[in-house]
Image (cartoon, rainbow, N blue to C red):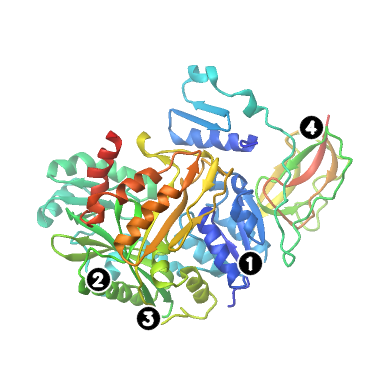
Amino acid sequence: MAVNRLFVANRGEIALRILRTARRMGIETVIGVSDADRDALPAQYADRAVVLGPAQATRSYLDVNLVLQAAKSTGCDALHPGYGFLSEKPELSRRCDEEGITFVGPRPETIEQLGDKLSARAIARAAHVPTVPGTDHITSVRDAQRAAEELGYPVVMKASAGGGGKGMFLARSPEDLATNYDRASREALASFGDGTLYMERYVEAARHVEVQIVGDGMGEVVHFGDRDCSVQRRYQKLIEEAQVTAMPPTLRDKLREAAVRLTAFANYRSAGTCEFLYDMAREDFYFIEVNSRIQVEHPVSEEITGHDLIARQLSVAAGQGIGVAQQDVAFNGHAIEIRINAEDPVAGFAPSPGRVTAWEPPAGPGIRIDSHMRADDIIPPFYDSMVGKLIVRGDSRETAIDRMLQAIRDFRLEGPKTTLPLAAQIIDHPDFRTNQFSTRWLEDKVLPAFLKE
Amino acid sequence: MPLKPSDIEALVELFDASGWDELHLEIDGEELLLSSDSRAGVRAAPATATAAPVAAPVATSAPVAAATADAGAPSATSARPASWVPIAAPNLGTFYRAPAPDAPPYVSVGATVTPETEVCLIEVMKLFTTVRAGISGIVREVTAQDGEMVEYGAELLWIEPT
């Protein structure tokens, strides 16, 4: 089961991030790229790069057959899917098994069970992990209205098969349900091929908290602490922190225990994240979902624990177990990550692709850049707009905030419009400094003020 | 050369599928305007973008590890007339010259082809796609190796147009 040659089925910063750890571990690397990425840094950094297809993701990064063919033809014995693209498609994990390629991620059954939110909730309940009070499948407006009477308004409707806000809406009255139900169901059907919705009680003031875990696939799970990702716009995270400081420490311990209990129950293999909603008023947390992949924000956990999570994934994939015991995971300081998206916040976050004319990232103790960009590189318009992540670590949250502000000021990035100026404004906001905000804060308070300036 | 013809093709496809009204892209002074409004074309399609070199993309220049299989490197024919046109691989896959192991090849050097003539197969995980010439002419060279992996855009055969 040793991993000798790894195929990276992704692009951008995460591809480079995976390639670097693999090389450090003495593993040969091959990356499959699209035509638009053939000159990008990951393609140059890998021992070998093969061009799968044209720029369109459906004919390159999202084509399971092409990816498998490339991995086989280049003699790879393992495949890392990164995040996004095919990373949470059970089909890729299953087909890898069939072809004798080690999938660096969970088993197909696990991805299926945890990928469907209703079955994930069932697993959570079986593992005695609290979930938001809610319903099973809802198939009509009348069903929805009846259920909402029992749960109490406001409620939120969500797509059973989906994520990313598709098919999701908030209802404060029976009329809200009647108005939005059909559209949301259609949207879920169009996005995920399944129009089924379910309902949850809506927590008015919530924090998004999550726990990073790595499992060996045989019931052993180690957690690498928690993260707070409450700065969100339309359910997309912009800023992430580790550890969570908005919860009492004893409650935070319970959060971690719950995540370990749930994933151990599922015999989880590889890296994953248990996401929870923290109800600020009730001081209680509810399980939301498991992301069965490495996540964008994994570096903040690496920064405070000193452990390389990609290395842990590759260790599990090679049949060598997690390689770290829980007592070896210590937490030092506070880390913050901001996502640098090539988007124009002033123009409704419209993508801003094109050539990066200047790229001079900050450097110094406690500063980390995860990015594949170089000066003169082009941000192709075909994919996600994230061009990198800026991560800082400080002894305390306060020093981390100051370090981040200085790092953003030192960052010289010219060409596309980016979210860097907005990130600086968020980080420097009194509410952020005092840690008094919810998942609604960015959209309700910060963005309107930012746009007015 | 920030925008290649293939990029523009891909953008048009993306645009068609998007339901957007307009897409305006500017890279290094090259402008591309895609619009669903037929009257919007006044300043669209700048000559710089469409006049990008149509010559064959130089494929398979990616680094190859010593330990990995050779990707059917094109035979270095330096004296290839400029009029010859390559048939490029539509995606990564295994190149086959014949429809079956014991069958004669689809075409050989010297064969006359029309746009509809089948010239080879590309296999991806047991799924076989027939590649057609797309042009009328005479087969002058078969650059890809039978049974070897080819990448997207790799030159498979060269045709002298007639």
Q: Residues within 10 Å of mark 3 (few under 14, many from 20)?
A: few
**In this rendering, the label closer to the viewer, 4 or 2:** 2
Could you give the CA–CA distance between mark 3 and mark 1, rounded to whole angstroms? 32 Å
Q: CA distance from mark 1 to mark 4?
A: 39 Å
> Residue B105 placed where, x, y %?
81, 50
Circle 1: residue type: Cys
Between disc 3 and disc 1, the foreground one is 3
Q: Which mark is residue A326?
A: 3
- Classify mark 2: residues with Cα within 10 Å, few (<14), some (14-19) or many (20+): many
- Residue depicted at 79% across the width and 46% down the height: B106
Q: Nearer the viewer, mark 4 or mark 3?
A: 3
Instruction: Tell us which disc is closer to us: 2 or 1.
Output: 2
Q: Which residue is mark 4?
A: B136
Q: Give the amino acid at mark 2.
A: Arg
Q: Which residue is mark 1?
A: A76
User: Which residue is label 2 attached to?
Assistant: A252
Relative to residue B25, is residue A150 drawn left or right? left
Alpha carbon distance from label 2 to label 1: 41 Å
In this rendered view, identify the residue nearer to me: A23 or A427: A427
Figure quadrant of residue A15: bottom right
Tell me which amino acid carries mark 4: Ser
Q: Earlier in the sequence, mark 2 or mark 3?
A: 2
Q: Could you give the CA–CA distance between mark 2 and mark 3, rounded to whole angstroms?
A: 16 Å
**Numbered disc in front, either 1 or 4:** 1
Q: Which residue is located at x 17 percent, y 51 percent?
A: A155
Q: Earlier in the sequence, mark 3 or mark 1?
A: 1
